[in-house]
Image (tube, helix red, strand yellow):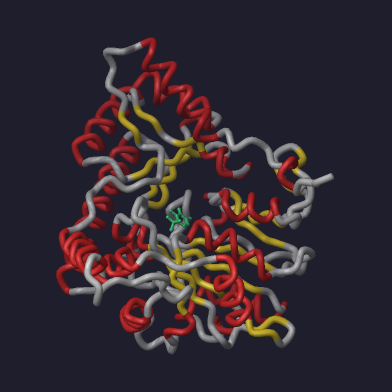
Amino acid sequence: MAQINENYLKLPGSYLFSDIAKKVAAYQAEHPEKEVIKMGIGDVTRPLVPAVIEAMHKAVDEMGTAEGFRGYGPEQGYDFLREKIVENDYAGLGIEPDEIFVSDGAKSDCGNIGDIFGPDNKVAVCDPVYPVYVDTNAMAGRAGDFAGDKWSNLYYMPCTAENGFMPELPKEKVDMIYLCFPNNPTGETLTKEQLKSWVDYARENGSVILFDSAYEAFITEADVPHSIYEVEGAKEVAIEFRSFSKTAGFTGTRCAYTVVPKALKVNGTELNALWNRRQCTKFNGVPYVIQRAAEAVYTEEGRAQIRENIDYYLGNARIIRDALEKAGLEVYGGVNSPYVWAKTPDGMKSWDFFDKLLTEAGVVTTPGSGFGPSGEGYIRFTAFSTKENTEKAMDRITNILK
Ligand SMILES: *Cc1c(COP(=O)(O)O)cnc(C)c1O
């Protein structure tokens, strides 16, 4: 008789966004005249930029000719894109094109990377956290059992206002460490010096850091590292994930990449070779048209056009920060990130504040507790709405918090 992967049965339902959707639907049914503004889900809204669209059109036309047609591409991505990535995103950092693996998403890569790690690794995650790291390790049997609000075998690193959202180095030995900076959901960052303490920890303990840099393009401050490889010695201990999703509006287009340096070895085995084997076996590459679209992000026009969109979102983040601060809330993130993380007023529970914002202001947010136990007492706003709706939402919130 066939057996299933029993680890899947241990997963608690992923109720966060469906619970939110249910509450919003109920509210709208009761108040059909009220316009609800959504500042909850982390998806971009600005259209793809002209340079990207032009490159896609051109690639589509090529595919319709005998000379230009492409079938299966290299599993690791086309050289034209891997070279552009290295030249632009890793200038001066000594990363080689064959250390870049182009993929259909940082979400899938963050999950799939677990394939090349043993089942007994101790995994450390920040709390609150992007749920993909936790759930994929639970599916792989590395998380133990879900008891109450935590997995028994995961090592949780609380990131709260009290520690400046900087996870504390583990007091016990951990083997795989997920770090995401600029962070989703808190919007906070680490300085290069802080990141260095993690690289040092990993070097001392033989751990591997899985560094999610999906929001790199939103960094505005000078001392915030864009890549973990800016820290000396990181190539021996870290894998980095990047994505065109938030950078260039590719959430529906799908293109990302993962950097696995050849210097990264576990017990003498190069992880680059293992990841290459994994990808060649289970993945058949990103469409040619999409890789040409991603390449266009690195042209002069492309770069200027995506910058404009990122600045637009960062402008919204500023509007959110300013309004919430004026309303008397403690506010974090939003400077190097499209996320603003705010403490609820008067110690309210995340869900209670969520309900208040929905029913009194008609604004949808994400309750911090949905990202982990240490997110309780916080709420997340995203800057991905239009400027007009962001302003309108902040006016309404200012009014109800008076
Ligand atoms: C949005 C996001 C990603 C990007 O995922 P894609 O699959 O490339 O769209 C990765 N990590 C975090 C933390 C994110 O919020």
Q: Percent position (x, y) of residue 90?
A: 38, 81
Name the side, left or right, on which 380 lies relative to 167: left
Q: Percent position (x, y) of residue 47?
A: 22, 50
71, 139: nearer the viewer: 71
| Residue 89 in view, yes or no | no
Q: Percent position (x, y) of residue 96?
A: 44, 87
Q: Which residue is at a point 50% across and 35% down the rendered structure image?
A: 17
Q: Percent position (x, y) of residue 202?
A: 65, 76
155, 192: nearer the viewer: 155
Q: Which residue is at a point 75% across and 63% down the rendered structure image?
A: 122
State whether residue 90 is above or below residue 285.
below
Q: Which residue is at a point 25% across and 73% down the rendered structure image?
A: 66
326, 2: nearer the viewer: 2
Q: Report the residue that reaches farthest toward the right.
A: 1
| Residue 175 in view, yes or no | yes
Q: Which corner quadrant of the figure contains ligand 1?
A: bottom left
Q: Quadrant of residue 38?
A: top left
